[in-house]
Image (cartoon, rainbow, N blue to C red):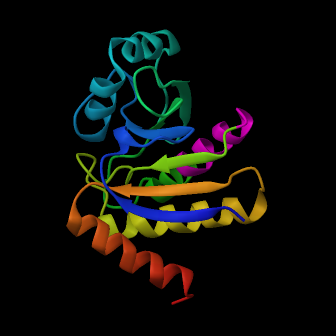
Amino acid sequence: MAKMHIIQGDITRLQVDAIVNAANSSLLGGGGVDGAIHRAAGPELREACSKIGGCPTGEARITPGFRLPARYVIHAVGPVWHGGKRGEADLLASCYRQSLQLAADHGLRQIAFPAISTGAYGYPFDEASRIAIRTVRDWLQAHDKMEEVYFVLYSDADYQRFQQIFQEETQGR
């Protein structure tokens, strides 16, 4: 099974096969991680995304990484938090599964995820983290296509909390 790593840092600086963008449905850039990835990749990313024509919530699309150290960007559109009664958990899990499957379909062996939907989309961090960890772990147990998965947290507080949740989830608590 692939190794899962938790790191603190800037996802736009990782030299991996693919980084995942917490994108909006237009794929044309926004704030937070999305804006940082678009700025670092250069205008070619926006041009490539405009040709895709958007992406529904819960799904993912792939583009080259352009000026990023990562070869590809996988754009995953997470759900906006509405209290958990509009299928948010299933949509968030789908983002992770679809991103992993797109990477595998393109022969990629490393992927790095941000904390999808936890910023401007308001998804509660702890719940989103548990969904991310469980979904990725379950996908990796069923597939042997990935070598390394990174969870990249920007702030120290998010990094510390994610590590704690990861330990709880992987030790069966």
Relative to 71, residue 94 above or below? below
Residue at position x 27%, y 24% in the image: 39
Foreground residue among 62 and 155: 155
Q: Is residue 109 left or right of residue 10?
A: right
On the image, the x and y values in percent for residue 161 come to 30, 74
On the image, the x and y values in percent for residue 124 come to 30, 64
Image quarter hosting the N terminus:
bottom right
Q: How many marks?
A: 0
Foreground residue among 170 and 147: 147
Q: Is residue 125 left or right of residue 70?
A: left
16 within the magenta span: no
Q: Is residue 1 left or right of residue 134?
A: right
On the image, the x and y values in percent for residue 9 come to 30, 53
Residue at position x 67%, y 54% in the image: 147
Residue at position x 60%, y 55% in the image: 148
Relative to 168, residue 28 above or below? above
Prevailing secondary structure class for the magenta stretch in the rendered image: helix
Query: Start and end of the magenta stretch?
Result: 95-107
100 within the magenta span: yes
Asked where in the image residue 36 lies, by quadrant, the reply is: top left
Asked where in the image residue 84 lies, by quadrant, the reply is: bottom left
On the image, the x and y values in percent for residue 138 come to 67, 65
Relative to 108, residue 38 above or below? above
Residue at position x 55%, y 29% in the image: 61
Foreground residue among 138 and 1: 1
